[in-house]
Amino acid sequence: MVDFSLTEEQKSLQDLARKFAKTEMLPVAAACDRAGRFPEDVYRKAWELGLMNLNVPTEYGGSGLSVFDQCVIVEELAHACGGMTTSIIANCLALEPILLGGTEEQRKRTLPAFCSSYHLASFCLTEPSGGSDAGGLQTRCRLDGDHYVLDGEKCFITNAPHASLYTVFATIDPALRHKGITAFFVPRAAEGVVPGKDEEKMGHRASSTSTVKFDHVRVPLADRLGAEGDGFSLAMRTLDHTRTPIGALATGIAQAAIDYAADYSLKRHTFGKPIGEHQAIQLKLANMAQEVHAARLLTWHAAWLIDGGQRGSLESSIAKCFASDAAMKVADDAIQIFGGYGYMKDYPVEKLLRDAKLTQIYEGSNEIQRIVIARELLTHYA
Ligand code: COS
């Protein structure tokens, strides 16, 4: 039977994340946003509570949570701050290729370090020449004895200035397109690894983003994930698993927008009554509630399918695309309900719009999600 209720364990994870979001994230969210501050103290506390390496199995010291459980947690965290949530879950994205494509020896060599003490990892796929065309990446890897030599530059890499390990996608020959792409893990300490300076972003300002240069970086053959040419499929399978939690992150932002707007609509009076009693506002709130409800259910459905062993490419793209578009619409409506105050930085809703915007772009733009959705759809009619 289909069951939409959370288990007792999921409710306690939700409760843990909600409390953490309220007591540790929310009180510093606006200040971090304004200053563009990376609140490492908050991230360390998230790590201590087991909120960081959510997808790493318990045998390596991680939380070993299903994608569904991750979504429950991520929505709660994002209610307080989308940017901090992105930094908190970046390890899940970066370590997923090791979980999916690494040997047991490679997993044992890399994963426990992230679970026994606070460390960050970054997923390095996107390049300055283009992020959507992942098959066209230009970073080169050349075999030289028992090492590969990596040369190239990645950009828009979450947590890169603070990471101790990078999962990197490079090509043995760009002319081979996706068939040449090969994945590696590369320690920050390797000679020639140079993270850039923090980017100044519109939103997600508590998260850190930079370029990473790989300048003749020698990577042992033993640190290659899978075979030469396996990297593209590994990146896609990783994103199939991580796009659904991005749907949850967008849902959390959208739920926050409703909560602020509904509360404000009962306190703010015009024409002699609370604005929430005007139909113009009620219609907006009703539309917002529909968007968020649908976003959450699509996210839960995609997570449920993936946890059941299905690939879930179609459903994770639908969840990510719908929820992020919903977050933009709902944050926009929340600002409209707040009126002029909504446009001011003294109120929390303009940040929600700036944070929501990135969810339409990262982990594959929504145009890419629509390509994935249409291609999957058409295979059933071919
Ligand atoms: N899982 C496993 N394999 C997959 C896959 C998936 N989800 N999606 C595609 N593949 C395989 C295909 O089956 C194909 O394999 P064969 O060569 O054996 O036939 C191969 O990968 C190439 O697939 P495709 O032809 O669809 O590749 P395209 O170059 O057309 O690119 C898109 C496909 C656009 C979907 C891909 O480039 C993409 O997702 N881009 C966005 C990248 C992204 O999200 N970046 C954000 C980084 S994180 S912030």
Image (tube, rainbow, N blue to C red):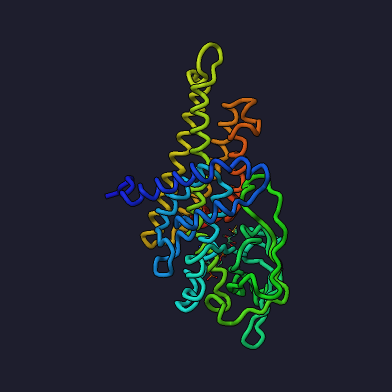
**Depicted 17 relative to depicted 94: above or below:** above
**Depicted 21 relative to depicted 191: above or below:** above
Residue at x-position 49% and y-position 50%: 318
Q: How many marks?
A: 0
* Residue situated furthest bottom in the rendering: 145
Residue at x-position 44% and y-position 54%: 70
* Residue situated furthest top in the rendering: 272
Front-lying residue, 172 or 260: 260
* Residue situated furthest left in the rendering: 1
Front-lying residue, 288 or 380: 288
- Tell me where residue 144 appears, x and y as whole percent: 67, 85
The answer to whether residue 241 is seen in the rendering is: yes
- Tell me where residue 73 appears, x and y as whole percent: 44, 50
Q: Quadrant of ligand 1?
A: bottom right
- Tell me where residue 255 appears, x and y as whole percent: 48, 38
Would residue 209 appear left or right of 60 to someone viewing this image? right
The answer to whether residue 382 is seen in the rendering is: no
**Depicted 345 relative to depicted 135: above or below:** above
- Tell me where residue 215 appears, x and y as whole percent: 73, 73
Front-lying residue, 229 or 333: 333
